[in-house]
Image (cartoon, rainbow, N blue to C red):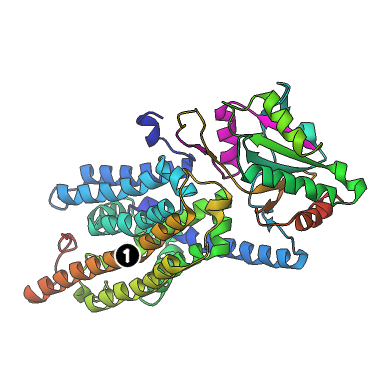
Amino acid sequence: MTPSALPHRGCTIPALLLCWLTLVLGGCSAAEEAWNGKDIQGLMPELEFQLTGTSGEQLTAADFAGQVRLLDFGFTSCPDVCPATLSSLNKAVSLMPEDLRNRVTILFVSVDPERDTGERIQSYVQFFGSNIVGLTGPEPSLRALTRRYRTTFGYEEADANGNYQVSHSAAVYVFDRQDQARLLLRPDLTPQQIAEDLTRLAR
Amino acid sequence: MTGFSYLLPYDFSPITLLSYVLVLGFYGCGLLLMVPEQRPGSGRILVFVTGVLLCYGVMQTRFDYYSQYMFFVHRGQHLVLHHLGPFLIALSNPLPVMQFWHRRLKLGQVPLLRPLAWIYRVLQHPLVAPVLFAGLVYFWLWPAIHFDAMLSRQLYWIMNWSMLLDGVLFWWLIFDPRSPASGEALGYGKRMVLLAAVAVPQLILGAWIVFSRGMVYDVYEVCGRAWPMPPETDQLLGGLLTWIPPGMMSVLGILIILRRAMYASDSDKTLKPASEGSTP
């Protein structure tokens, strides 16, 4: 390597130590508070998006300010993961104390804008519950959003009938009422566990 | 996607781009400015540039996208950053170019660089270097840490850069073109022991990943894959890439050092100039 790269060598060790410390300390505080979901505080940027609502209106994170927001990626033709996730989330919200339920909004982002019209998304999310907001947007906006939260989606080849599978994140991102990324809900959590976490965040 | 867009970075990092431009810039300018007798031959230049471009390619092209969303591609990325790229860079022996800049910029007189030289000596200690080399692989593959590193952009960059820099340090220690007889470089025997020592823990880790029944690295499951692939297949391929190629790199390294050692004893243990003894 040329001498230009020399300063990096000095930076590596302190940087590594720092990151190790962050991880250790982060792990300690997580153990103290014991969330059921995966604690992602500080790992991800705050909630920010610009997408289209089901009536064609432009929506941003500010439109849901002050709410605990659950960001869920999926598509309405999804055979298993999305319906299971949405019904589990809805069940979790119904298990929360009554006065806190309206502080939670589930943002269902369709990553299949080709097939998912606003109308279709609306009837889909309505089926699962009242506090679910359907969103989508042109593919570049969706790509930017998924990249921001370090996830992705992909399309399979369409079959003879034009049906195709979409691979997408199976986890749900939880943002607190101050827009900060707080939890990642893995698919194996029960509605009761999710409700416990959401109740703490909504208080 | 068009062919050209595959060459564009998925997650553009100005610091990374600048670092590569500086490395290649200093190397290229050094070649042009230095006296022809000391200039490395075209084969060595090609090996150096290939090593650097390989590392750049896995960090700042579409390859990085697949590395973020497929475990086995991620293992391929680290194989290049920790092994193959630095292996080629060190093997190409850029020492004459570095010495040229060292003289030209009078780096020996910069007091700020002295602590760096001290840190360098600690990192290159024959007991520290292999622990750091294999330890980093374990550190970033520790399931909980791996999960966080794949979720956090900052940690992800720290991970990749630490793998690259440590790879360069380790392979430079192994392929140091200076003769051990000069007292400045590690003995050939020790180098071979180090290569064997770093291979064993990597073999164990790779085999453990391959034979794990459950999902060890579920972050790829949680965050979506670049294309639909059974998670077990992804983990199996990733485990194989952690298991076999690093061992092969060590064997290759040992063979190169062995050849160099024999060459050194043949030539009556005379002290060779720094620019020699660099050919594979």
Find numbered disc 1 in the image and state the secondary structure of the residue it sits on. Answer: helix
Left or right of A70, for residue B137: left
Magenta span contains residue A151 = yes
Q: Position of residue B159 (x, y in %)?
A: 49, 56
Image coordinates of residue B37 in percent, x first then y, are: 12, 51
Of residues A123 and B226, which is closer to you in this image? Answer: A123
Q: Is residue B40 visible?
A: no
Residue depicted at 18% across the width and 61% down the height: B278
Packing grade of label 1 (10 A; few <14, some 14-19, many >=20) is some
Q: Position of residue A75 (x, y in %)?
A: 62, 35
Name of the residue lying farthest toward the right:
A99
Q: Residue furthest top?
A: A56
Q: Is residue B191 above or below residue B242?
A: below
Apparent side of residue B254 relative to residue B206 in the rendered image (left or right): left
Amino acid at dot 1:
Ile
Query: Which residues, given as a range, are shown in magenta?
Result: A131-157
**Residue at mark 1:** B244
Q: Chain of mark 1?
A: B
